[in-house]
Structures are given as C-alpha cells and as structure tokens.
Amino acid sequence: MKTSEDRPGNDHDSEDDGRVLADRYAKADRNRKQKLRRGISVMISVIALIAVIAFASVYIKQGRKFDYNEHLDEEVLSLDGTSVTLREFGFYIYEVESFTQQQARKYNHTDPLDYWNTHFSAGNDSQFVSELARDTAINACLGDLVYAHMARDAGFVLPEEKTEAIPDEVAKWMQEISPEQMDALGLSESIVKEVIERQTLAKAYAYEYSSQADLSGYSGDVAQLLSGGGEYFEKELLSKYPVKKNEKLIAEMKFGRISINKEQ
C-alpha cells in the first residue's frame, strides 16, 4: 500500500504550498508595514498642523496687540461736530490716571495695578477700577464739550481774570507731567493749552448755569448731578446733542497702563 509520501509529485506540491504560504505572509507583512507608515505619516501631519495652528494663534494675538501710538489721530468721540482724537483725549487720560494712581499707591504701594484690577460689585454697575477710570475720563470730556458748546451758544464771555489765568494753568500742568508721559499720550503743549481753554470756559459756564438749572425731580449732590455722567447732565443736557463714540477704540484703552505702569 502506497502512502502519501510515496505518491508522485508530493514533494513538489508541498514546496509550492510553502512558497504560497510564505508569499501570503510576506504580503501581509508588507501591508501591515505600509499601514503603519501611513498611520505614522498621518500622525506627523496632524501634529505639524496643530503646531502651525498654535503658532498662527500666537502670531495673530500678537499682531492684534493694541498699539496706542498707531491710533493717536483716530476719533475717540464727537459731540455735535466737535471731534476729539485719541491724542487730544490723552489730556483726560492723564488727569484720571494720575489721580487714580495716587489712590492705587495708598492701596498697594508695591503693586499699584492691584488696585487698578480691583472689581467692585454693584449689580449692573459692577466694574473694574480701570473701567471706572475710563468712563470717568469720557464723562469729563463730554462735560467740557457740552458746557463749552452751551457757553458759545449763549454768548457767554469768559471773565478776564480766568482768561489771564490760563497760561499759568498750562505751565502748571506741563510741570506735573513727565516728558515720557507726554510722548506716551502723543500730547503737545499746544493741545494741552487748547483743552485747558475749553475746560476753563466750560467750568465757568457750568457754575453760571447751576444757579438757574431746574433740578426739581432730581435728588443728590448738585455738582454731581450737573457734572459729566450725572443724572441731570445725561437726561437734560447731553441728550440734546448728537454724540458719537468709537466704542472699538474706547474698549482698547487699558487705563492704569497708558501713561503709568507701562513697565509692568
């Protein structure tokens, strides 16, 4: 009886079967390696893409960093055709920052920004000190614009003694501000003089107006009611004039870091 080992051609068939099996294993191994290489390639591409996105994000943020000096001649606000640029508004920025900085140093002498970053919770009126300072500067500017406008419309003439005092006021103001702060704000002595002239006229007329203002229906301190931002001022005076505000530019003003604390 012949066994399978005695059958003709058995060795050849076994050899063929082994070669086919080996080819299959080799092909499967090649496919596995190709898939692995493709997987690694995809992973590297994803990592590279993430890195590019992260870099682009940082670059975009840096590119969007507000450069104060590039916006000096942009309008911050206007009232009835009278425009105030960021350069001119620098007068009010300095006034508010220098005053608030005194309070900040009392609050924390070693880190004044601690005070500027303090948040006061008061319902809808909750604000950081820096935001309150910004609003104060805007209200002060609007107050000067409104009362100066009213004075001119009323034919109000500034008393001679107040006119004569303006040069001294300008000189005093210029002595208090540093050259570095003047540069940071884009101010010049001529701009300071122009703003002080308007401010002097506005204050003189506001004082005159306070004696005739009908405050019935309003309660509180008279000076506060009549000042820029005051309830009477907002409802009875400011509302009579068309006002435009550059909200985008105003939002970029980081009070506490414009003419002071720039190195921190």
Image (spheres, rainbow, N blue to C red):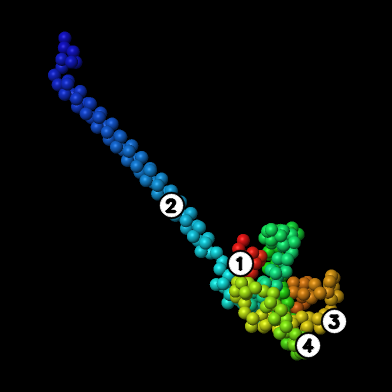
Q: Are marks 1 and 4 in contact (CB under 8 Å)?
A: no
Among numbered discs 3 and 4, the one appearing first in the sequence: 4
Q: Which mark is residue 161?
A: 4
Instruction: Name the secondary structure under disc 4.
Output: helix
Distance from the alpha carbon under mark 1 to that under mark 2: 32 Å
Say which residue appears at 41% left-offset and 45% top-offset.
Answer: 43
**What amino acid type should be assigned to the residue bearing mark 4?**
Glu
* Residue matched to label 1: 252
Left or right: where 77 falls relative to 125: left
Q: Quadrant of residue 114?
A: bottom right
Alpha carbons under labels 2 and 3: distance apart: 70 Å
- Secondary element under disc 1, as helix, strand or loop, is loop
Q: Do we see residue 244 in this rendering?
A: no
The residue beneath circle 3 is 211
Q: Quadrant of residue 4?
A: top left
Compare residues 83 and 129 and report the one nearer the observer: 129
| Residue 127 position by quadrant | bottom right
Measure how far apart labels 3 and 1 are at the Cα level. Answer: 39 Å
Mark 1 neighbour class, 10 Å CA radius: few under 14, some 14 to 19, many 20 or more: few
Q: Which mark is in front, 2 or 4?
A: 4
Measured as percent of width and height from the top left, residue 53 is found at: 47, 55
